[in-house]
Amino acid sequence: MAQGGYHLSINDHQQDLRHLFVGLNMPVTLSGGEKPLINFDNAATTPPFQTVLQAVESFAPWYAAVHRGGGAKSETTTRLYEEAREIVADFVGADRDSNVVIFVKNATEAINKLAYRLAQARDRRDIIISTVMEHHSNDLPWRSKFRMLYVDVDDSGRLLLDDLKKKLRLSRGRVRLVTVTGASNVTGHINHLAEIADLAHQNGAEIMVDGAQMAPHLPVYMKGSAGSGSLDYLAFSGHKMYAPFGTGVLIGPRKTFDYGHSEIVGGGTVEAVSQRRVRWAKSPQRDEAGTPNVMGVIALTAAVKTLKHLDMSLVAREEAKLADYARKQLSHIPKIMFYGDQENHNYKVGIIPFNIKGLTYDKVALDLAHEYGIAVRSGCFCAQPYVRKLLKVPPSEIEKEFTGTDVTYRGMVRVSFGLYNTKSEVDLLAEALDSISAKTSKTITPQW
Ligand SMILES: Cc1ncc(COP(=O)(O)O)c(C=O)c1O
């Protein structure tokens, strides 16, 4: 299929998609010679699409200041910048009339912005419900501003909807917002957003979805369907979806952002200023203080167009197939211990957390990198409460992490897939882990 500049379909093997990306076969020098680097750290950040670099390069001659600048360059820049909001809104099925698309730096900034804004309209008794499985970026921004409740997970790390129902019931209409990740950056578990959204709405609350690990891997439809499952707020990052140029997105109802002011104020955010008074501009301008990152927005738009062209349903299906294959291959590794739901591999994005019994997580990650040229992540992935829960770390050990004496930090190894990873890369990972696992007798054995 030759369409829109791409000469293949995602139905072809992933190998054929690789030319859409920049820098996939970079050589690394290892003790056994040079090898192409294999990147399995896509949940942290992703390489750029070729289309993203091309878009930035072809736009560069037209780059100028947005909005009030005169001349053809400024008009072109402004048009593309404003059109980007529509393209991004359509990508995640947001209603363009009732929502604003605000460009920020990343998902973390997006969530901080929303927390700051909702706090301005806060009733003292308002409660935010978050969950035990959140990235710190969807937990810490809320803590200083609201009373928090955390929905628990079961032993496999799946979110307990009954616990959410109980918390909503006991809070008796005082929950302002339920804030939940679309997919976990630790286990890859996908949450049942439509059901969570309906529960929130039935209890007079709104829902905010941290889409950092969802938008790059799954179709998102903020409007919901048949009057059910609509999402009020969505945050995500360009750098996790092949557009690493420093742009993130916050989408939410216009009425929320037309109240109060942004956490950062200054140029571009006002209609009128005197030394005693300010009349704020309407959002999104009210929320984008200073000169915006136009190049980042151009990059994000190109990534969104490419993903849309590839079709997010097919992206999800292909990534799930690769993750299934990887789970099977890795399950043959002696002493491997997987975390997360091992029964039901549906409702997961391509993330596999594990340890090798007898080896510390950082040792496994370092060996993979230095001996085999395979990049993975290790540690707690900015989700310490969730990782501790999955590792069943005893409370006395957790306490030590805060008092700072005799601390043993725990963690896992995380393999996370991008659209371009292949079965043969997975085979090399399995071979490498097989050899690493054989070394276990020489090292410390973690108890969990
Ligand atoms: C689930 C989740 N939420 C939020 C973030 C924060 O994203 P960023 O670092 O782009 O702000 C991450 C990053 O890993 C994440 O995985």
Image (spheres, helix red, strand yellow):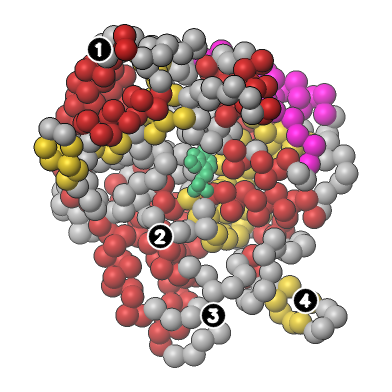
Q: CA distance from mark 4 to mark 3?
A: 18 Å
Left or right of 225: which side holds 303?
left
Mark nearer the viewer, 4 or 2 = 2
Circle 4 packing at 10 Å, graded few (<14), some (14-19), many (20+), is few
Q: CA distance from mark 4 to mark 2?
A: 32 Å
Mark drawn on residue 118: none
- Going from the N terminus, do you reach mark 1 or mark 4 first? 4
Residue with the mark numbered 1: 438
Mark nearer the viewer, 2 or 1 = 1
| 274 over 262 or under it: above or below | below
Left or right of 296: which side holds 410?
right
Taking the spot 77% from the left edge, 76% from the top edge, the residue there is 279
| 32 over 18 or under it: above or below | above
Residue with the mark numbered 3: 67
Circle 1 packing at 10 Å, graded few (<14), some (14-19), many (20+), is few
Question: What's the amino acid at mark 1?
Answer: Ala
Question: What's the amino acid at mark 2?
Answer: Phe
Which residue ends up furthest to the bottom in the rendered image?
A: 71
Using the rendered image of the protein, determine whether residue 320 is visible from the camera's viewpoint. no
| Quadrant in the picture for residue 323 | top left
Taking the spot 67% from the left edge, 33% from the top edge, the residue there is 130
Look at the image and give the residue range highlighted in magenta. 146-171
Residue with the mark numbered 2: 245
- Local SS, label 1: loop
- Local SS, label 2: loop
